Image (cartoon, rainbow, N blue to C red):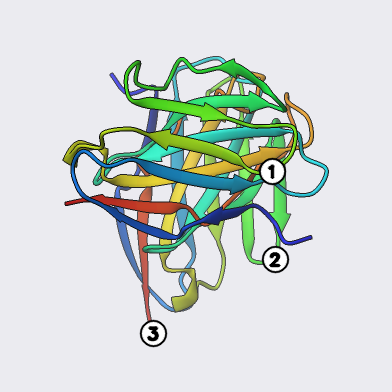
Amino acid sequence: NAGVMQNPRHLVRRRGQEARLRCSPMKGHSHVYWYRQLPEEGLKFMVYLQKENIIDESGMPKERFSAEFPKEGPSILRIQQVVRGDSAAYFCASSQHTGNTEAFFGQGTRLTVV
Amino acid sequence: KNEVEQSPQNLTAQEGEFITINCSYSVGISALHWLQQHPGGGIVSLFMLSSGKKKHGRLIATINIQEKHSSLHITASHPRDSAVYICAPHGGSNYKLTFGKGTLLTVNP
C-alpha cells in the first residue's frame, strides 16, 4: 500500500495560470480531504469529497477553486488564474470511513506563484 | 480567540530529555489527532485518541475530554524527533479537523 500520493510535490506557476494538484488516496479509501497550509499559518480545511461527490466545500474560496474526485483516477484540486496569495502547501488526506477513523496524509504539494 | 491553543510554540531540548507539548481546545470534540510535520515534509498522523492514553514507542499521548486538554510526551528525545507537532481535534467527522498552529521542536545532539 503506497499511502496517499500527491503530485507534483512542487509546482511553480505564473500569476494568471492554472494549477492542478493531484491526490491518489490509499487503496480502499473513498473519502478524500484537502487542506491548505499558508506560510506561517496552521492547516485549514478546504473540501471533503467522496467518490464523485463533494460533501463539504465550506472551506474552499468561492472563486477560482474547484475540486473533484471522479469514479476513476485521482482527486484533483484546481486553481484557476492563480495569484501570489495562493502560494501555500496543499495537503490531501484520505480515510476508509468518516467519523472517528484515522486519516492518512500525503506529502503535500507546494505551490509557488511567481 | 483560537479554538486550539498549543504550548509552547517553540521548544529546544537536549538529546535524551523528556518533552511535553500541550494542547487546549474550546470546541466539543469526539477525538483528537496528534500530527508530525518535518520541515518541508509531509504530515504523519502519530495518534488519534478519544480518551485516556496511547503509547507508541517513545511517544505517549494523553487526553482529558472533560478538561479539554491533551498532551504529547516524548521520552528520551532524539535529534530525529525535531519537527513541528500539530494538535488537531475533531467533532465527529474526520474532515472537520481544527488545527493548532503547531509546536516547533528542536532536539540538539
Out of A49 and B66, give the one closest to the viewer. A49
Measure the C-alpha gap from mark 2 to mark 1. Answer: 36 Å
Instruction: Identify the amino acid type marked 3.
Output: Pro
Q: Chain of mark 1?
A: A
The mark lying in front, picked from 3 and 1, is: 1
Q: Position of residue B101 (x, y in %)?
A: 35, 40
Q: Residue at x 35, y 15 (%)?
A: A62
Instruction: Identify the amino acid type marked 1.
Output: Gly
Measure the C-alpha gap from mark 3 to mark 1. Answer: 45 Å
Q: Position of residue B75 (x, y in %)?
A: 57, 66
Instruction: Identify the amino acid type marked 2.
Output: Gly
**Residue assigned mark 3:** B109
Q: Are marks 2 and 1 in contact (CB under 8 Å)?
A: no
Helix, strand or loop for disc 3: loop
**Residue assigned mark 2:** B57
Q: Position of residue A32 (x, y in %)?
A: 64, 34
**Residue assigned mark 1:** A73
How crowded pointer 3 is (Cα within 10 Å; few <14, some 14-19, many 20+) is rated as few
How crowded pointer 1 is (Cα within 10 Å; few <14, some 14-19, many 20+) is rated as few
